[in-house]
């Protein structure tokens, strides 16, 4: 594959993505952004709660520190 074919493929993919995103109005974009932020916050919270629980299991933190981390 040549560099020209790769860049053309990337350009076509971006064009298709922009065409699909062009049908959304501002309210749709705000709704999708809110949903993505909600999912991201859930995943961050899950990750750090799991990490704190593993530290509690291994004895590196106390029960009080574990409970204060969830606040």
Image (cartoon, rainbow, N blue to C red):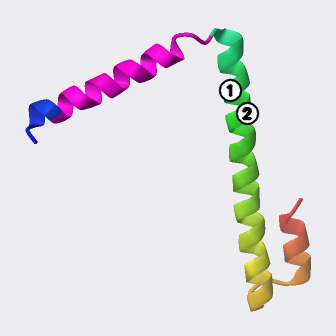
Residue 70 horizontal/vertical position (percent): 86, 63
Q: Position of residue 68 (x, y in %)?
A: 89, 67
What stretch of residues is rendered in magenta?
Answer: 6-24
Q: Are marks 2 and 1 in contact (CB under 8 Å)?
A: yes
Please, which residue is most extreme toward the bottom here?
A: 59
Question: In the image, is residue 71 part of the stretch drawn in magenta?
Answer: no
Q: Position of residue 16 (x, y in %)?
A: 40, 21
Quadrant housing residue 64:
bottom right
Distance from label 2 to label 1 (Cα)? 5 Å
Q: Quadrant of the C terminus?
A: bottom right
Residue sitting at x 73%, y 23%: 31
Dot 2: what SS?
Answer: helix
Task: From the top left corner, tell me how far across and down residue 48 is, in percent.
Answer: 72, 64
Residue 9 versus residue 37: which sits nearer the camera? 9
- Which quadrant of the view contains residue 7? top left
The quarter of the picture where residue 65 lies is bottom right
Q: Classify 10 as above or below 1.
A: above
| Residue picked out by circle 2 | 35
Taking depth in this image into account, of 56 and 14 the one nearest to the observer is 14
């Amino acid at each position: 594959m040549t560099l020209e074919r790769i860049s053309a493929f990337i350009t076509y993919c971006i064009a298709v993505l922009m065409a699909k995103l062009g049908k959304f109005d501002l309210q749709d974009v705000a709704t999708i952004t809110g949903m993505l932020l909600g999912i991201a916050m859930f995943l961050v919270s899950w990750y750090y709660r799991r990490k704190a629980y593993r530290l509690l299991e291994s004895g590196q933190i106390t029960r009080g520190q574990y409970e204060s981390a969830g606040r």
